[in-house]
Structures are given as C-alpha cells and as structure tokens.
Amino acid sequence: MALPKYTEPHYRIWHYIYLTICGAVFFFLIAPLFVIFPLSFNAEEFLSFSDGMKRLDPDAFSLRWYKDMIYGTKNPWGLAAKNSFIIAIFATIGSVVLGTVAALGLSSRHMPYKGLIMAVLISPMIVPLIISGVAIFFFMAKAGLAATHTGIVLAHIILGTPFVVITVTATLSGFDHSVTRAAASLGSDPVNTFMKITLPLILPGVISGGLFAFVTSFDEVVVVLFLAGLENTTIPIQMWTGLREQLSPTILAVATCLIILSTLILVTAELLRRRSERLRGINQ
Amino acid sequence: MSSETKQILTTDGIPLEVSLKKAERKNKIKAFLLVAPLLFFLIITYVFPIGDMLFRSVDDKMVTQMLPKTFKAMENWDGQELPDEEVFAAFHEDFIKLVEDKREGKLSTQLNYTKNGFKSIIKKLRRKSKSFEEGNYKEQIMSVHKRWADVEYWRAIKRRAPEFTSQKYLKGMDMYVNEEGKIVSVEEDRRIHRVLWLRTLEIAFFVTVFCFLMAYPIAHLLATLPMKYSNLLMICVLLPFWTSLLVRTASWMILLQQQGIVNDFFVGIGLVADDNRPEMMYNKTGSYVAMTQILLPFMVLPLYSVMKTISPSLMRAGKSLGGTPFVAFWKVYFPLTIPGIGAGCLLVFILAIGYYITPALVGGASGTLISNQIAFHMKSTLDWSFASAMGLMLLSGVLVIYWLYNKLVGIDNIKLG
C-alpha cells in the first residue's frame, strides 16, 4: 500500500509502525506452524533444533520419525488414522444430508418459528464442547452406544450439522427462487427440481459445509475422549495422549501430515468460495 | 366487513381467502418437514441429554432410596434431641438390608459428603451389627461409637432425606448448607471453585482483548490491500483456522518449553540469563499465548467481513473535510466497524470461556479453566452430578452471551471462512 507523496513525515512513520505491527501479528499467526515442519525431520530424539540442524548438516535430518509413524512397533497411528477417516467420512455424509435438507426448510419464507429453530440447530456450535461432551456421553451410555463407532459418528453429526446449516443457508440467501418455480411450471417434481436445479447451484455451499463438518470430526477430541474405547481411538486422541505423556518427534511427523491435509482443505475451500462468489455475481 | 361485499372465489368455488390460507399452511408444513429430521435428531440426542444433566445435577434420590424406613420414622423427629428408638430401629432395618446388598459402602461415601466422619463409624457399625440382639437398637447402635450418640450426625442423615438438592450448585460456588440450614461459604483457603470461575472469566476476557488488539490492524490491512496481496495474506489467517487444534497446541508446547525457541531467542538477545530461563508453559502465560493465537482467526474474520463493506471514499471524505487521518479514522471508520467488533469479541469470548484442550496441555495448575474441572469430575472423581451442575452453570453464562450475540448480530449472520 503506497502512501501518497504529500503524506506528512509523522503520518509516514505511523504508517510504517502500523505495517510493522501487522507483520508481527501475521508472524505470530503463521510462524508456530512452521516450527513443526523442520523439527519433524530431526535425526535426534529432541524437540529442539540440534546444532547439526542449525548448521544445515544433512546428517542431522532424517525420515526416522516418519518411518516410526508408519512402521513403528505397536504404534497406534495406523488404527487411529483408519478410525479417524471412517468416522469423519460417515459423520460428514450424515451432517451434509441432515444439514442441507434442514437449510432448505429454514430458508423457505414459510418456515414458522424460524429464529427459535435456528437457535436450536446452531446450538452445538455455541455450547462449550465439554458440556456437549458430557450430555452426549450421557445419551450414548443410555443408548448403549458408548465406545462404538456408531456413537462417535452420531456425536460428530451433532457437532458438524451447524456448519452445514450455516453455509448452505448463506448460499441459499443469494438463491433465485424463480428458477425452481420455472422448473415446477415445466412439470418437474420437487425431488427432480432439487437434484437438477437447486443442488448444482448450491453445491459450493454444500461442499464447503461438508469440509467444515469433516474437519470438525477429524479434529474433534473432547467428545471422543468421553466416548471412545481402545478400539475407537482416533488421531486426535493419540495426539492428546502423546502430548500429555511425552512429546515424541513422531507426533511432529503426524502433525506435519495434518498440516499438509489442512492446506489441501484450505485450498479446496478457497476455490469453492471464489466459484460460489462468481456464480452469485452472475445471478445479480 | 359488510355482508354485501362479494367474496372472491377461486375456480373451484372456494373463497380465495380460505384457499390462500390452505396453501400457506401447506407450505408451512412442507418447510417444517424439511427441518424436522435434524430438529428431532438434535432434540433426542442433544437437547434432552442436556435436560438429563439438569436432572442429574439436582437428583439426590440415592440416599433417599437407601434409607426409606429411617426417613419415614424421622418425619416426626424435631431434630433437637437424639431421635427415638423407632428411628434407630428403622435405621437398623435399612442398614441390614444395605449390608446384605453390599451397598453400605456407597451409603458411607454419600453421608460423608454431608458430614465428615461417617466412613469409619459405618464400617464399625457393619462389623458390630452382626452381633446385635433384637430390641433396644438405640442403646446398641450408640455403643458402637460415640459419634452415633451425637445428634449432629443424625441431623446430617436427615438432611439427605429430600429427593432433590441444590447442594451441587452450592458446592460449585464454594458454599454449603450448615447445621442450622443456612447457606454459608466454605473457609477462605478452600474456595477452589470461585478461584476457577474468576480465572476463567479473567482469561476469557483478556484473550478477547488481546485478540481484538491484534486482529484489528491486520483485518484493516486485509480489507484495504488490493485483492492479489490480501488473498495471499489471508492464507496466514485461514491456514491456522483450518489446522488441527492439537497441532497448534503442540507447536506452542515446542516453542514455549524451557529449552524451546522462544526462550533461546530471549537468551540470545540477552533478555534473560541462560541459567534462569523463565517458565512460559504449564502456567497462565501458556494459556494466554496459545489461546490468543488459536482464537485470533475467529476475531479477524468477522472484522474483515465488516471492514470489507466500508467504502474507502468515506475516509477520504473525512480527511477532505479537514479531519486529520486520526480524526477521520476515529469518527468515521471506527464506528462503522463496531458490528464486527461486537461479533468477533462475543464469538471469541464464548469460545474462550469453554476452552478445555489447550489449557489442559499448556496451562498447568494455574492456567486451567472451569472446563478442566468439569472433565476432572467426569473422569476422575466420577461425581457426575457435580460435573453436570458445573456444566450447567457454565452453560447458563454462555447462553446469556449467545442471546446477546443473537440480539446484536443475529445468528443467521454468522459467517464462516
């Protein structure tokens, strides 16, 4: 952001101070993530940069911890990763279906008690996770679903739907309802109209809601801590136990993989957002 | 309406008004049916269980059901002198039944919550009661231990007669009902919960303030920079936002440890001596630093979305009318961002007040919050009714803020990403 030539000196100084502050905040936000990256290639068992690493000595770097993550004896990461993906995928499907259908109803102008119902549907996002955890645990224990995949999937559907409801309702707010009326007048039944007309148009919103639901489930630890047995361990649970007991560099290897995954998700989400904005731009 | 007015009829001969109302109702039902699956799913799996927590937190039937005859006999007892033989006999009868079911241990734990000293005398009573003779139970029970002859202990038992209790809520605020039935606070040095509530509020408040102070300048920069630069910088906000909470907490654990990079840096610039590295983790500092960084995106995004809508020409107009850049900012720009500030602050505060994972990992003993206490009672002491009571106290606070948020911002206006 260039300053105009006529700017007085002391404003110029202020401007540079402002830019410095911004730089510092951006650094504070992003730098911690990049600490993990090099340390996960540490050849030694310490969680700080060894002298060799500071000299960029190639011998100080190794893939040791990545090997340990994949092949390590009695390592839990394989099972945890499998569980995490299974749970997250089913939770995402459930959240997307329930959330999208609900969002369709909510954005109808005929919906009675809209405010109240919206407040209930969003509440799992607002209520502190620990309270959700306790409540869901009581329910699952009574229903006999504690320590089962089904129980955890249901719990994650509860936590994931608010995101889908919010993103899809937001997409629908810019939706031109005359196109569905046009479809109906041409003899299409509601299901057909939804599949052929509505869904393709709101798809970016649905997918980005789904991404939120996926990340919520994939990263969720508080509720799972109450629900999971040994068989249902997930990546976040293993990270949690690892971080509490002893910080081993294997965790950093896992963390690096997770950062790569979140980068991929971020890129997808951004592309979708832009596409959706472009589509809405055309509608206007 | 006058009767001469001709009603407008539809082609079917039904008055238009009726027909419209019918269509309206049909649409309402249609819309509701779409929402119904999720709504009922949430009501069954989520809203009812929270109600269940409420029930558990006041439920005190356990002792009531363990000593049914005793409490029946106690109904006529005024609580001044030791109770009559009738009460002792009933208590003996209940007690023998409990011993048969091997539940007397549970009774002693429960009664010990009300008054210390029950554990040992119940154990003793169990041993001695095997050789009790029929009749005159008052004498026999009193001879087991002198506390059984103390009216205080019988009053303590009577206090457990009701099926519902507010005891757990009082305990959550470090209060209890004393012998005279008055609500009083526990001694100063045992007020652990009040300290926790205050600390939770304090940390949530300051994290919100820090987040605001850091987010405002960068949100402004993001909103005013040309698109191609701001998109790049936006990644710095969004990547942490999408990254696992545990990964971010792990990176702070590495940075803040005593041999960590932050400490190395402080030693390097000569701020602290090498042998006197400050403890930056496992205390409040750890909680503050990590929570601020983790919650920062939640402040930046609402501020950014509001600032994006403010036209730059407004500031220029302010300046051209003679305001210095500061005056223009303070009088024109800042008031326009207040909705974003409100949304961001409330969101961060709500999230911070219920934080669990990060304080548990980097907060140590002095940096943990009320959530950690709830988890502790759920998992370690298994006092689920107390955990429920604390949870609901926290929840009521959050709901007040949620309500405020809804009034000020509107939940339909929550924006993600």
Image (cartoon, coloured by chain):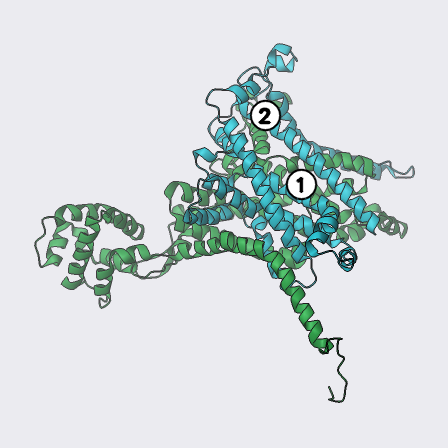
Chain colours: A cyan, B green
Q: Residue furthest right?
A: A6
Residue in the picture at 53% in, 17% down: A45
What is the secondary structure assignment of the residue under circle 1?
Answer: helix
Q: Compared to A203, does A107 lie above or below?
A: below
**In this picture, residue A252 sits left or right of residue B416:** left
Chain to which mark 2 belongs:
B
- 1 and 2 marks in contact (CB < 8 Å): no
Would you say residue B348 is visible in this rendering?
no
Inspect this view and state whether residue B63 appears: yes
State the residue position of label 2: B263
Say which of marks 1 and 2 sits in front: 1
| Kind of residue indicated by mark 2 | Asn
Q: In the picture shown, does residue B3 fall above or below B335?
A: below
What mark, if any, has residue B297 been given in the picture?
1
Q: Amino acid at mark 1?
A: Pro
Residue at 21 percent of width and 58 percent of height: B151
The quadrant of the rendering that contains the C terminus of chain B is top right
Q: Chain of mark 1?
A: B
Local crowd size for mark 2, using a 10 Å CA cut-off: few (<14), some (14–19), many (≥20): many
Image coordinates of residue B35 in percent, x first then y, are 61, 57
- Give the camera-side residue of B20 and A222: B20
Closest to the observer, B300 or A170:
A170
